[in-house]
Image: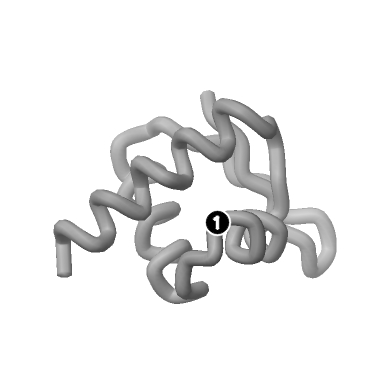
Amino acid sequence: MSDVIGTAAGTLWKYLDKNGESSVTKITKATKLDAKVVQRAIGWLASEGKLNIEVNGRTETISLK
Protein backbone atom coordinates (compact mmCIF):
# COMPACT_ATOMS: atom_id res chain seq x y z
CA MET A 1 0.00 0.00 0.00
CA SER A 2 2.86 2.41 0.73
CA ASP A 3 4.00 2.15 -2.89
CA VAL A 4 0.51 3.23 -4.04
CA ILE A 5 0.57 6.17 -1.65
CA GLY A 6 4.12 7.10 -2.66
CA THR A 7 3.17 7.07 -6.33
CA ALA A 8 0.08 9.15 -5.58
CA ALA A 9 2.23 11.62 -3.62
CA GLY A 10 4.43 12.01 -6.70
CA THR A 11 1.37 12.54 -8.89
CA LEU A 12 0.01 15.09 -6.44
CA TRP A 13 3.35 16.94 -6.30
CA LYS A 14 3.55 17.12 -10.11
CA TYR A 15 -0.05 18.31 -10.36
CA LEU A 16 0.48 21.10 -7.82
CA ASP A 17 3.79 22.10 -9.41
CA LYS A 18 2.08 22.51 -12.78
CA ASN A 19 -1.30 23.91 -11.66
CA GLY A 20 -0.62 25.72 -8.40
CA GLU A 21 -3.01 25.93 -5.46
CA SER A 22 -6.02 23.65 -5.88
CA SER A 23 -8.89 22.23 -3.89
CA VAL A 24 -8.78 18.60 -2.84
CA THR A 25 -11.89 17.94 -4.95
CA LYS A 26 -10.25 19.44 -8.04
CA ILE A 27 -7.05 17.45 -7.46
CA THR A 28 -9.02 14.22 -7.05
CA LYS A 29 -10.99 14.79 -10.27
CA ALA A 30 -8.00 15.96 -12.32
CA THR A 31 -5.64 13.17 -11.25
CA LYS A 32 -8.36 10.47 -11.29
CA LEU A 33 -6.93 9.09 -8.05
CA ASP A 34 -9.18 7.58 -5.41
CA ALA A 35 -10.20 10.20 -2.83
CA LYS A 36 -8.79 8.16 0.07
CA VAL A 37 -5.47 7.75 -1.73
CA VAL A 38 -5.33 11.52 -2.36
CA GLN A 39 -5.90 12.17 1.35
CA ARG A 40 -3.13 9.74 2.26
CA ALA A 41 -0.77 11.34 -0.28
CA ILE A 42 -1.55 14.75 1.20
CA GLY A 43 -0.73 13.37 4.64
CA TRP A 44 2.55 11.93 3.35
CA LEU A 45 3.67 15.21 1.78
CA ALA A 46 2.39 17.28 4.71
CA SER A 47 4.35 15.15 7.19
CA GLU A 48 7.47 15.96 5.17
CA GLY A 49 6.65 19.68 5.38
CA LYS A 50 6.14 20.06 1.64
CA LEU A 51 2.57 21.41 1.56
CA ASN A 52 0.58 24.43 2.60
CA ILE A 53 -2.97 23.51 3.59
CA GLU A 54 -5.61 26.18 4.02
CA VAL A 55 -9.24 25.71 5.03
CA ASN A 56 -11.79 28.33 4.02
CA GLY A 57 -15.25 27.23 5.11
CA ARG A 58 -15.74 23.78 3.63
CA THR A 59 -13.05 24.19 0.98
CA GLU A 60 -9.58 22.88 1.66
CA THR A 61 -6.85 24.13 -0.68
CA ILE A 62 -3.43 22.58 -1.09
CA SER A 63 -0.27 24.18 -2.48
CA LEU A 64 3.45 23.46 -2.47
CA LYS A 65 5.72 25.28 -0.03
Question: Nearest the camera: 55 or 16?
Answer: 16
- The residue lying at 36 percent from left, 54 percent from top is 8
Question: Nearest the camera: 7 or 39?
Answer: 7
Q: Which quadrant of the structure image shows residue 43?
A: bottom left
Q: Which quadrant of the structure image shows residue 50?
A: top left
The 10 Å Cα crowd at callout 1, few under 14, some 14 to 19, many 20 or more, is few
Location of residue 3 in the rendering, given as x and y in whole percent from the top left corner: 16, 57
Name the side, left or right, on which 58 lies relative to 28.
right
Name the side, left or right, on which 33 lies relative to 54.
left
Give the structural element (helix, strand or loop) at label 1.
Answer: helix
- The residue lying at 43 percent from left, 75 percent from top is 36
**Quadrant location of the N terminus in the rendered image:** bottom left
Question: Nearest the camera: 35 or 44?
Answer: 35
Location of residue 15 in the rendering, given as x and y in whole percent from the top left corner: 55, 39
Name the side, left or right, on which 23 lies relative to 15.
right
Q: Which residue is mark 1?
A: 31
Amino acid, disc 1? Thr
| Farthest right residue in view | 57
